[in-house]
Image (cartoon, helix red, strand yellow):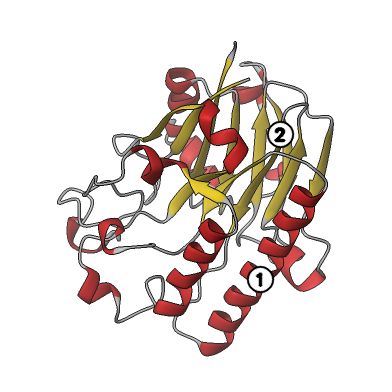
């Protein structure tokens, strides 16, 4: 069997990550077969795609309507059968949050889930997005598709996933109603690959607030995930986090999947 390396990375500004050479170095060292990026904050017209074209990747973009905000990008060496942008719901799709790619053995979604910030309106928007996204997953599963979905979920699920749980409760990203959504995804038949393979591991984070050198001290959150439908989990040979990769306040996460 062949193995695919599938990765996700919130780059928090693609132009800066490219300018610093971080994305190019990561593509060269990790060599993912498929990579999804969130919070790219750019459009195709603003980017020289040669660094990844030279490595054999094709690209698909879902930029936000608002300049310099949100946005998703998919790079893939295997050719998808079909690519779809968004969920088909305008108030979510104008923020450029979802790219779906169909491959022969699975459907993949790379997604940038909303950050609720400190406003009640955005928290409601975030929870409504989760509702729509889970309904879309279940629709795809109802069609008999195996699923891989990944991205910045903007939620730490359990106390294992955040360095300072009591501090985290003061803001969004660790609220009970947010954490309940991760539980609901799992109860619906989807697997958090990293936690499934590393059930007790602490101090494995994917995001660090830049404030007071929290990354250097590993005071972070695990809010970036790769999920699979239960039927694919026996094929997941590795699930990993790459905290050594710089260029963003997040780091890449990924899996190796047998096909």
Label 2: state its secondary structure.
loop
Residue name at image x 68 percent, y 21 percent:
77
18 or 34: nearer the viewer: 34
User: Residue at label 1?
Assistant: 131
Label 1: state its secondary structure.
helix
Quarter of the image where one finds residue 88 = bottom right
How packed mark 2 is, by other alpha carbons closer than 10 Å (few <14, some 14-19, many 20 or more), is: some
Quarter of the image where one finds residue 212 = bottom left
Q: Residue 106 carries which label?
A: 2
Residue name at image x 47 percent, y 35 percent:
254
Q: Can residue 203 be seen in this view?
A: yes
Residue name at image x 68 percent, y 62 percent:
133
Residue 1 vs 51, above or below: the answer is above
Q: Residue 202 carries which label?
A: none
Residue name at image x 45 percent, y 51 percent:
224
128 or 59: nearer the viewer: 128
Q: Is residue 119 left or right of residue 214?
A: right
In percent of width and height, residue 125 lies at: 62, 78
Q: Is residue 211 left or right of residue 94?
A: left
- Gap in Å between the C-alphas at discs 1 and 2? 22 Å
Residue 246 vs 27, above or below: the answer is below
Q: Which residue occupies the extreme bottom position in the image? A: 120
């Amino acid at each position: 069997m062949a193995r695919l390396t599938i990765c996700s990375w919130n780059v928090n500004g693609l132009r800066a990550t490219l300018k610093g050479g971080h994305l190019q170095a990561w593509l060269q060292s990790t060599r993912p077969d498929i990579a999804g990026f969130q919070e790219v904050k750019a459009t195709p017209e603003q980017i020289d795609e040669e660094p990844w074209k030279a490595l054999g990747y094709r690209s698909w973009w879902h930029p936000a309507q608002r300049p310099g905000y949100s946005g998703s990008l998919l790079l893939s060496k295997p050719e998808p059968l079909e690519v779809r942008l968004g969920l088909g719901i305008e108030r979510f799709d104008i923020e450029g949050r979802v790219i779906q790619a169909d491959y022969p053995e699975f459907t993949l979604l790379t997604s940038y889930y909303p950050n609720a910030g400190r406003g009640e309106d955005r928290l409601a928007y975030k929870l409504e997005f989760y509702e729509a996204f889970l309904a879309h997953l279940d629709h795809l599963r109802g069609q008999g598709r195996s699923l891989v979905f990944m991205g910045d979920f903007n939620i730490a699920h359990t106390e294992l996933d955040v360095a300072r749980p009591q501090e985290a409760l003061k803001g969004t990203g660790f609220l009970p109603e947010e954490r309940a959504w991760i539980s609901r995804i799992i109860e619906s038949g989807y697997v958090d690959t990293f936690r499934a393979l590393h059930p007790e591991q602490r101090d494995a984070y994917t995001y660090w607030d830049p404030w007071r050198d929290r990354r250097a001290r590993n005071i972070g959150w695990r809010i970036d995930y790769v999920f699979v439908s239960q039927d694919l989990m026996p094929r997941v040979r590795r699930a990993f986090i790459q905290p050594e990769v710089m260029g963003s306040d997040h780091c890449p996460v990924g899996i190796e999947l047998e096909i």
